[in-house]
Image (spheres, rainbow, N blue to C red):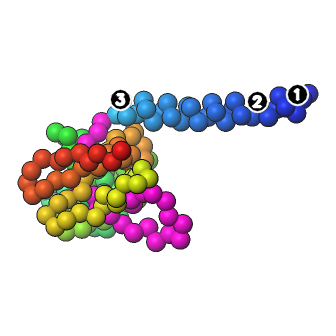
Amino acid sequence: MIPGPARGLLLALLQGGLLLSLAGQLLLDRATRPRGWILSEPVDPHLPIRGRYVNLALLVPAPEVPAGQARPWSGERLVLRSEADRVRAELAGPATPRSKSLPATPQGEGWRLGPSVAYFIPPGVADPSRRPAGEQLWVEVTLPAQGPPRPIRLGVRRGDGPITPLELR
């Protein structure tokens, strides 16, 4: 039997190891998985407890529909790809596992991915989602093998210009 203080230390080491393994996995994904910029739109999370974060809906250009196939509808699943520093979507085929695709809803000329993602803001920084007219909020994301994109940083695009990363530190 392990004495009380040693059990507490063992539990603390186990929890620390779990936390470090998660952090290592996230860093490995960021270094090895594809990434790209994706248009976003802020969403009010309607939560009574709010932190310093922006909840972002991710918008992708509509995927090409193969000839002879009907236009997709709400609830369609998409697979994300990174091309030329931008995130693009393809319709998930019947053989695509659900864990490797995301649900999406048509919105205007593109698709809105579900679920939205949270981007955490440092204390003392103004809400970056409040943009003047003519500016679009973009988010650079890592595309993991499974699950929704993981936000890395925010950027702004004015008109047809390039995406300029925001300095939020």
The residue lying toward the viewer, choosing from 130 and 3, is: 130
In this rendering, is residue 83 above or below 117? Answer: above
Q: Is residue 140 magenta?
A: no
The N terminus appears in which quarter of the rendering?
A: top right
How many residues crowd around disc 1 within 10 Å: few (fewer than 14), some, or many (20 or more)?
few
Distance from disc 3 to disc 2, alpha carbons, whole Å, reads 32 Å
Amino acid type of the residue that numbered disc 2 sits on in the rendered structure: Leu
Residue at numbered disc 1: 2
In this rendering, is residue 76 above or below 26? Answer: below
Residue 164 place in picture, x, y as percent:
19, 46
Distance from disc 2 to disc 1, alpha carbons, whole Å, reads 10 Å
How many residues crowd around disc 2 within 10 Å: few (fewer than 14), some, or many (20 or more)?
few
Residue 7 place in picture, x, y as percent:
82, 32
Measuring 50% from the left and 69% from the top, which residue is drawn there?
47
Q: Which residues are magenta?
A: 34-55
Label 1: element kind: loop
In this rendering, is residue 116 above or below 142? Answer: below
Pointer 1 or 3: first along the chain: 1
Q: Is residue 49 magenta?
A: yes
Label 3: element kind: helix
